[in-house]
């Protein structure tokens, strides 16, 4: 016998809870299921806790540079990792508790705790309880990928989740993976005082970005004393006493790295392998992502997939937008679509990278295949007054323009405030207005954003 609901939501990440509240407020009887921590990755092991730690690392770095600003410290700078973790736990915990208490106090919404499995296209089991509904929404997120490297299963390794339990300073943190998660943790723990080595199999860091962005980020990290090994394959892990020995190969030459701790940051996979999707006939792709259409509907009528598990975006903001798309279509008679959104995200090293739309590499490809005329503007942060005043002049900003339509194709702002300044560009892209709207705008001085109009006034053909 099943308990009947009008909607069942599996997972309490960034899409599930707001959808539950919207549907409950519309008078629908809703069940929401969480097997572990309320709030999902962002609240517990992702955005909120890691950026809280990034803030602590920034404070440590700024304190160490105090003399540059005329500020003297009475004693050498030191970092209390237990207090860093306690601050992180308090902020993350508050968000976690807010999500849970908000759901439990929502009228028409029943919270179930346990592992959910689909039993049919309209039935879900949670332990011994079986629920049924005409509408089912899957919001189960993802987890770290564990690469198949000999010896890895024989050493105590860390991933992005277990790093949240670290309340000590690793003597030498070896990071496998030179992309977003690995770089954030690498710089963070270097600033706390650890020796850090980053191993990347590719020829450059974060290959998704343009080569000049990758090169600038490499320079930033190396200036802070982080050792980065590019084009390096990890062959084997072994434990020798208190050390972890990492056998690597670079350009045909073998060597060893000895560290105290290893962080595996080689990617993520969706939490879809133990949901019983096959019983409901829900289709997934080769990597396990649930296949959805432009309105996030699966191939099974009455089942939707939102957030990281659908492969349409791996960010908190895209997950929340998934909720907005589903709610708009089901409750507001507003035909919103995934294809309406513009790719945008940030990398939270210091200084941060803010990105929107196409990369320069993608724009050059567009020029080749469609003969589009593209203009580009670029400005180093050394010529941005706000960055100079703050003593944070690493990085640059650049923007790409379709010469015929005058529309912005994409932009990158690597520099202080880059994660905020990018929205000045992004909003005009969403408005589908020419770049001259920003170029002719009067921005506040001194800010990073004020140099965007200047950059747009210095456009040159992309060669």
Image: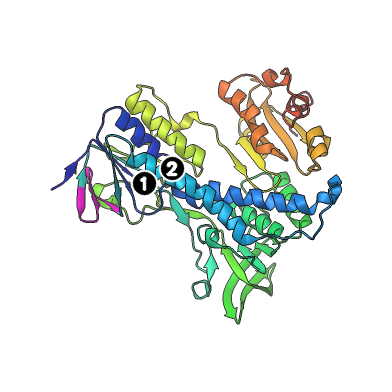
Q: Secondary structure at mark 2?
A: helix
Which residue was labeled with disc 1?
A: 11
Residue 371 lies, in percent from the top left, at 65, 29
Relative to 416, residue 125 above or below: below
Residue 125 is situated, as x and y percent measured from the top left of the image, at 23, 51
Region in magenta = 116-130
Q: Residues within 10 Å of mark 1 (few under 14, many from 20)?
A: many
Disc 2: CA contacts within 10 A as few (<14), some (14-19) or many (>=20): some
CB within 8 Å, label 2 to label 1: no
- Magenta region includes residue 328: no
**380 left or right of 203?**
right
- Alpha carbon separation for disc pair 2 and 1: 15 Å
- Name which of mark 2 and mark 1 comes first in the sequence: 1
Residue at 73% in and 45% down:
212
Q: Is there any visible trace of residue 220 in the rendered image? A: no
Q: Residue at x 24, y 56 (%)?
A: 127
Which residue position is annotated with label 2? 98
């Amino acid at each position: 016998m099943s308990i009947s609901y009008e909607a069942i939501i599996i997972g309490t990440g960034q899409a599930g809870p707001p959808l539950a509240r919207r549907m409950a407020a519309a008078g629908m009887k809703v069940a929401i299921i969480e097997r572990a921590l309320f709030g999902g990755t962002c609240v517990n092991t992702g955005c909120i806790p890691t950026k809280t730690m990034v803030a602590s690392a920034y404070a440590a770095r700024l304190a160490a540079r105090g003399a540059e600003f005329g500020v003297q410290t009475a004693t050498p700078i030191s970092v209390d990792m237990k207090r860093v973790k306690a601050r992180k736990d308090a902020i993350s915990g508050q968000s976690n508790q807010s999500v849970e208490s908000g759901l439990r106090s929502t009228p028409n919404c029943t919270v179930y705790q346990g592992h959910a499995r689909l039993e049919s296209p309209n039935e879900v089991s949670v332990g011994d309880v079986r629920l049924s509904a005409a509408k089912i929404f899957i919001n189960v997120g993802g987890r770290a990928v564990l690469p198949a490297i000999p010896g890895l299963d024989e050493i105590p390794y860390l991933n992005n989740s277990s790093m949240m339990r670290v309340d000590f300073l690793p003597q030498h943190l070896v990071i496998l993976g030179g992309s977003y998660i690995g770089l954030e943790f690498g710089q963070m723990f270097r600033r706390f005082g650890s020796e850090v080595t980053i191993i990347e199999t590719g020829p450059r860091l974060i290959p998704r970005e343009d080569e000049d962005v990758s090169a600038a980020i490499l320079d930033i990290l190396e200036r802070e004393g982080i050792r980065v090994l590019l084009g390096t394959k990890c062959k084997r892990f072994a434990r020798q006493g208190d050390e972890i020995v990492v056998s690597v190969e670079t350009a045909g030459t073998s060597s060893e790295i000895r560290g105290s701790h290893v962080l595996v940051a080689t990617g993520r996979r969706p939490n879809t392998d133990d949901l019983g999707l096959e019983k409901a006939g829900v289709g997934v792709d080769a990597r396990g992502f649930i296949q959805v259409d432009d309105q996030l509907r699966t191939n099974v009528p009455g089942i939707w997939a939102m957030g990281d598990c659908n492969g349409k975006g791996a960010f908190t903001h895209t997950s929340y937008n998934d909720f907005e798309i589903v709610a708009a279509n089901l409750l507001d008679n507003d035909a919103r679509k995934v294809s309406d959104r513009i790719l945008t995200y940030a990398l939270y090293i210091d200084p941060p990278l803010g990105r929107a739309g196409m990369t320069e590499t993608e724009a050059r490809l567009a020029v080749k295949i469609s003969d589009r005329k593209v203009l580009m503007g670029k400005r180093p942060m050394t010529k941005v007054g706000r960055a100079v005043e703050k003593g944070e002049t690493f990085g640059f900003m650049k923007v790409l323009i379709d010469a015929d339509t005058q529309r912005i194709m994409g932009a990158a702002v690597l520099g202080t405030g880059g994660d905020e300044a990018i929205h000045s560009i992004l909003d005009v892209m969403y408005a589908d207005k020419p770049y001259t709207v920003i170029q002719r705008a009067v921005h506040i001085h001194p800010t990073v954003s004020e140099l965007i109009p200047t950059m747009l006034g210095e456009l040159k053909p992309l060669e």
